[in-house]
Amino acid sequence: MSVVVSGLLSRAKAFWPMLAGIICARTALIVACYGSYASTDDGIFTDGSMFVICALFIVALLIFSRSRRELGATAVQWIMVGSITVAAGASMALSLLDSADQTLVATAFALSIASTLALSLCMFYWLRCLRGTDEVTAALFVFSAFFISVGIVYLLSFLPTRAQNIIGMALIVAQFAFLGPAGLRAEHPTERPHRRARTFFTFARSNIQDSRFLAACAVGMALL
């Protein structure tokens, strides 16, 4: 048991900036675009913006897969900074809109799309920072982030919509504080490289049958 606890603590010490970053990004996305789940299937303001973003991502995936181009580290950093800025601005604008004014529906939907796109890119960035980790760390990271985020979203759902968006903006801006620590972790990896890496998190496809990985996934899904 002490070995397990020691392993979890070492992982938390190494990957806390990415964990905190994706928690902030996902929480802000749910608050801004899904109303903290307080009202589900609320017309275009729930899944509508996500459908638009998924279509954009499919187009981008097709373009990048055909060109086989890769973004450099500097470009990724600037995209992240731009995403945080756009998401914070959209969240603040949503907090100032009168949701009861039907003339502002199109504006609110456009802001929701912008926020969804920017915060999705933020989450992609934090996942990108996990490159080189083993399968157990990847599973623990994702499930822990979602588990903590769900708890925060639940608490925020009791607040007025404007207050939720303001807090969401604060969470978005807070991601700036984690960029530096995440960069230091990338410069000093703690995981040993896998020689047979074939997937994003550097574990071979056959390792999907690894009992540790399946156990981590099972515990994570149970908590969710």
Image: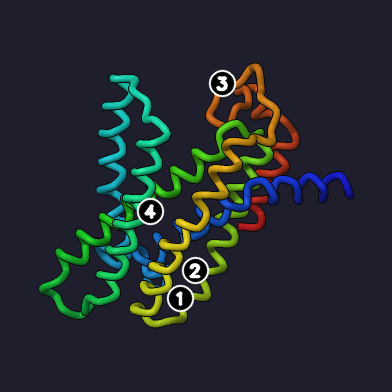
Looking at the rendered structure, the kind of residue marked 4 is Leu
Q: Secondary structure at mark 3?
A: loop
In the image, 196: left or right of 71? right
Say how many tags the image has: 4
**Residue 196 placed where, x, y %?**
64, 17
Identify the mark nearer the N-term, 4 or 2: 4
**Residue pointed to by mark 2:** 153
Dividing the picture into quarters, in which one does residue 171 lie?
A: bottom left
**Residue pointed to by mark 1:** 157
Q: Is residue 102 above or below residue 51?
A: below
Q: Is residue 207 above or below residue 114?
A: above
Dividing the picture into quarters, in which one does residue 193 lie?
A: top right
- Residue displayed at 67% across by 46% down: 14
Mark pair 3, 4: CA separation: 27 Å
Mark pair 1, 3: CA separation: 41 Å
| Dot 4 and dot 2 residues touching (CB under 8 Å) | no
| Dot 3 and dot 4 residues touching (CB under 8 Å) | no
**Residue pointed to by mark 3:** 198
Q: Nearer the viewer, residue 187 or 224?
A: 187
Comparing labels 1 and 3, the label whose residue is closer to the camera: 3
Q: Is residue 128 above or below residue 193?
A: below
**Residue pointed to by mark 4:** 119
Looking at the rendered structure, the kind of residue marked 3 is Arg
Identify the mark nearer the N-term, 3 or 2: 2
Q: Secondary structure at mark 2?
A: helix
Q: Secondary structure at mark 4?
A: helix
